[in-house]
């Protein structure tokens, strides 16, 4: 099973790993494009006003541009620990046991505008580049990534669970991947798409899938794994699962 996560705009700073080695990242087929994009991002950081415009940043976020300038020399950490935010708080990989972390490292991957896709253990520096960013002199990130990244993701023999947000899923759709929609159910039985807590619920799903001892190989077996964990999951056919949660804040683990 391969669980694709969205990245986050914010990243944990620092790290104790060696500088970025693109050749050491998973999916080496992506190395040429990764190299091109890293070069473009580093070059862009030399022109701060242009970098603000391209990356959608304000002057108060110039530290993000400074981090991009040192992409090749700054310290790294595992990708699954680099990203921050609601989803990653719910995933909470640092609380996993050694056996759980081993499974998580095999199963989890993160979509990335800069690197395409990263395995959980891939060592990366902090950076700033979003799926909707436009790098001067280059085509859109979608047009760059889609031809090469789609083949890489489609080539896996594992069941793919795609939890990426829309912009990142569009960089390289995965035919046949299982997706998860989150709906909240009110006491009167009416339902609505979850917005505010969507990432937190998907983080819970990711944690369950990362740590389960089962190896689901179909959407039906995947639903069974989630149901055994106490989640209300529905399947109306196809490859989409619906996670139904009570209206209101996400419960604590």
Image (cartoon, grey):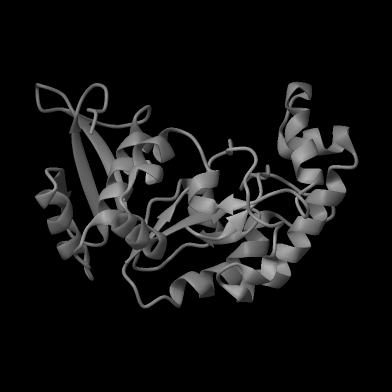
Locate the N terminus and report the quarter of the image it occupies: bottom left
Does 202 appear above or below 118? above
| Residue at (86, 37) in percent of width and height | 50
Front one among 153 and 101? 101
Residue at 47% from the left image edge and 34% from the top image edge = 85
Question: Can residue 138 be seen by looking at this rendering?
Answer: no
Dividing the picture into quadrants, the one containing residue 222 is bottom left
In the image shown, does 29 or 135 lie closer to the viewer?
29
- Residue at image x 56%, y 68%? 149
Of all residues shown, which one is farthest toward the right? 47
* Along the line of sight, the residue nearer the viewer: 120 or 18: 18
Seen in the image, is 150 located left or right of residue 102?
right
- Measured as percent of width and height from the top left, residue 48 is found at 87, 34
Q: Position of residue 16 (x, y in %)?
A: 63, 49
Where does residue 35 sit, x and y in percent of width and height? 75, 65
Q: Quadrant of the C terminus?
A: top left
The mark tally for this picture is: 0
Residue 229 placement, left or right of 92: left
Answer with left or right where residue 28 lies relative to residue 249. Answer: right
Up-down relation of residue 139 to residue 16 (above or below): below
| Residue 1 shown left or right of residue 77 in the figure | left
- Position in image of residue 244 (x %, y %): 18, 38
Res. 29 in view: yes
**Residue at image x 54%, y 52%?**
79
């Amino acid at each position: 099973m391969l669980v694709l996560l969205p990245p986050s705009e914010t990243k944990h700073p620092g790290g104790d790993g060696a500088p970025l080695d693109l050749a050491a990242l998973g999916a080496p087929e992506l190395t040429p494009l990764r190299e091109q994009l890293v070069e473009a991002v580093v070059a862009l950081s030399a022109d701060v006003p242009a970098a603000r415009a391209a990356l959608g940043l304000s002057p108060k976020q110039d530290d993000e541009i400074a981090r991009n300038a040192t992409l090749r020399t700054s310290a790294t950490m595992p990708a699954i620990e680099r990203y921050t935010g609601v989803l990653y708080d719910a995933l909470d990989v640092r609380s996993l046991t050694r056996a759980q972390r081993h499974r998580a490292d095999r199963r989890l991957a993160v979509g990335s505008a800069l690197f395409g896709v990263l395995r959980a253990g891939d060592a990366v520096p902090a950076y700033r580049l979003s799926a909707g960013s436009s790098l001067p002199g280059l085509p859109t990130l979608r047009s760059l990534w889609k031809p090469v990244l789609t083949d890489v993701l489609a080539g896996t023999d594992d069941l793919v669970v795609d939890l990426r947000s829309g912009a990142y899923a569009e960089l390289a759709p995965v035919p046949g991947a299982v997706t998860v929609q989150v709906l909240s159910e009110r006491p009167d039985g009416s339902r609505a798409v979850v917005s505010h807590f969507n990432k937190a619920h998907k983080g819970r799903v990711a944690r369950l899938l990362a740590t389960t001892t089962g190896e689901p190989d179909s959407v039906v077996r995947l639903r069974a794994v989630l149901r055994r964990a106490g989640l209300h999951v529905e399947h109306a056919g196809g490859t989409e699962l619906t996670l139904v949660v009570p209206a209101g804040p996400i419960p604590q683990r």
